[in-house]
Amino acid sequence: MNDHRHAPEGASRQANETAAGARFTTAVAHPNIALIKYWGKADPALNVPAVPSMSITLDALTTATRIRFDASLAADTISMNGSELAASSSQARRITTCLNTLRALAGTELKARVETRNDFPTGAGLASSASGFAALVVAAAGALRLELPATDASRIARAASASAARSLFGGFAELPAGAVGEDVAAMALAPAGHWPLEVVVAICAEGPKAVGSTRGMLDSAASSPFYRTWVDAAAADAAAGRHAVLQRDFAALASVSEASCLKMHAVMQTTRPPLLYWNAATMATLERLRSLQQDGAEVFFTMDAGPQVKAVCAPGTGPTVAAALAAVPGVSRVLTTALGGPARLDAAPWA
Ligand code: PMV
């Protein structure tokens, strides 16, 4: 559906000139949040999910990444939100590994200068790795003049961060489960215009999360007594979520999404050591949403590996929910967003 190609001529047209004359290519991508959750790996080495997931892409949160491959560079250098990453850091190594895949496809060993920034909190359960790797793959493919269908870009992004596979697509996206050695990609389920849901994000803590998803998932698989049950029920949840989206059935989507979220958190909380991502503001926000639902508001919650609550609202319901959640004790601010488009090259100058 959204299988757009990042054409070579588009890449050169959209490369920005720096003062020094070196060419950068810029891409933007939006984070997505899963309504049917991914938690668990069938193949940890290849980063293949053990469960199918389904997500919505958020318009108002954006990662912008620009990249330049340059013969004068001895190594990849990466700036994230204005700070240089140490080459030995886990973030830098993940980025270089992802770039290596694209370099191999392009038949080059040129090193890259990467600059990336988010207009929202990084590493705090707001899916910054999803938008980050989606933007990186699109920018690097453009800079290398690779004609990469979105499905192939999604597969490469998945190897770095499985949720990033979904951010290649706008609107509603699905990522299937895979088996050992299976190189799965996400796919579009429906574009944003199919059902203009609104999302209110209640920021319940600004800091980075305590335990990252990769470590957490491995610990859950090894120690949660509920992990197997979670995996076994996931296909049915994904089918119910897909059907609800295609039918625009809000009550059905709310029911299966809240259930998927709470089952994932039950697995997290029963992991050893436990993964407790919620705080007092998270609980207060859930209580407020329950009372809004009892008053008839079409809204439901979802949460990821962090304390933030994402309230998914029927079209037109966002402003009421945003006003209610902004008044919850401990919520520092709320962000309201429509559903967004796919990751793409962006001609906008890097300000
Ligand atoms: O792809 P990762 O490693 O960022 O894991 C994402 C896990 C959750 O955000 C908790 C769930 C999901 O499906 O996005």
Image (tube, helix red, strand yellow):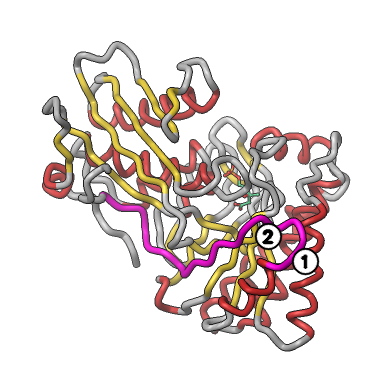
- Among the two numbered marks 2 and 1 on one chain, the one whose residue lies closer to the N terminus: 1
Residue at the image point whose x is 27% and y is 46% from the top: 148
Q: Which residues are magenta?
A: 327-345
Q: Nearer the viewer, residue 295 or 153?
A: 295
Residue tagged 1: 286
Image side of residue 298 versus residue 129, left or right: right
Residue tagged 2: 309
Residue at the image point whose x is 35% and y is 32% from the top: 115
Which numbered disc covers residue 3? none
User: Horizontal and vertical percent for residue 137?
Assistant: 35, 40
User: In what element is the residue under mark 1?
Assistant: helix
Residue type at the position of mark 2: Val
Q: Is 184 contained in the magenta span?
A: no
Q: Is 333 contained in the magenta span?
A: yes
Taking the view exactly as shown, the residue that stands out farthest to the bottom is 296
Residue type at the position of mark 1: Leu
Among the 4 quarters of the image, the one containing residue 200: bottom right
